[in-house]
Image (tube, helix red, strand yellow):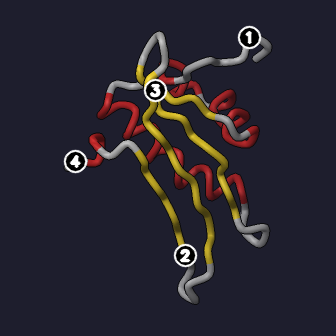
């Protein structure tokens, strides 16, 4: 099974002391209009810099969207704000809010 065939993707990062730095998931779902990746809650340890973590992790989400040719539907407000600030996600953003 390839990475894109797995309908549930889990991403976790730990520090050298095995303390969770961040965790996020993506699920491939069938919608009436298309198949999409849903990006669920993006957890960042409060002791970490959220902006730096997003800058390190979001290229993974973009690469998955590009490889699978499927859009991403971000549900977490932090990720939505990140997508709004990074034009490279525009063509992969499913259900982009009209107010952005």
Badge 1 local density, few (<14 within 10 Å), some, or many (20+)? few
**Residue extending furthest left?**
1
- Report the Cα–Cα distance between label 3 and label 2: 28 Å
Q: What element does badge 1 sit on?
A: loop
Question: Where residue 14 is drawn, which disc sits there?
Answer: 2
Question: Which of disc 1 and disc 2 is earlier in sequence?
Answer: 2
Question: Residue under circle 4?
Answer: 2
- Report the Cα–Cα distance between label 4 and label 3: 17 Å
Seen from the viewer's position, the closer of residues 65 and 40 is 40
Q: What element does badge 3 sit on?
A: strand
Q: Residue at x 43, y 15 (%)?
A: 34
Badge 4 local density, few (<14 within 10 Å), some, or many (20+)? few
Question: Which of disc 2 and disc 4 is earlier in sequence?
Answer: 4
Q: Residue 45 location, x and y as percent?
A: 72, 68
Q: Residue at x 27, y 41 (%)?
A: 5
- Report the Cα–Cα distance between label 4 and label 1: 34 Å
Circle 3 or circle 1, nearest the eye: 3
Q: Residue at x 53, y 50 (%)?
A: 25
Picture layout, residue 83 above or below residue 99: below
Q: Residue 63 location, x and y as percent?
A: 38, 39
Q: Quadrant of the C terminus?
A: top right
Question: Residue under circle 1?
Answer: 98
**Residue extending furthest bottom?**
17
Q: Residue 66 location, x and y as percent?
A: 35, 31
- Report the Cα–Cα distance between label 4 and label 2: 24 Å
Q: Residue 74 location, x and y as percent?
A: 62, 34
Picture layout, residue 43 above or below residue 97: below
């Amino acid at each position: 099974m390839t990475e894109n065939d797995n309908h549930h993707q889990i991403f976790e990062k730990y520090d050298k002391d095995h303390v969770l730095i961040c965790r996020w998931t993506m699920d491939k779902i069938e919608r009436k209009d298309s198949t999409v990746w849903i990006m669920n809650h993006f957890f960042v340890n409060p002791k970490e810099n959220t902006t730096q973590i997003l800058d390190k992790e979001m290229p993974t989400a973009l690469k998955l969207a590009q490889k699978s040719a499927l859009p991403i539907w971000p549900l977490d407000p932090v990720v939505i704000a990140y997508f709004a600030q990074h034009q490279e996600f525009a063509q992969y953003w499913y259900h982009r809010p009209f107010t952005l």
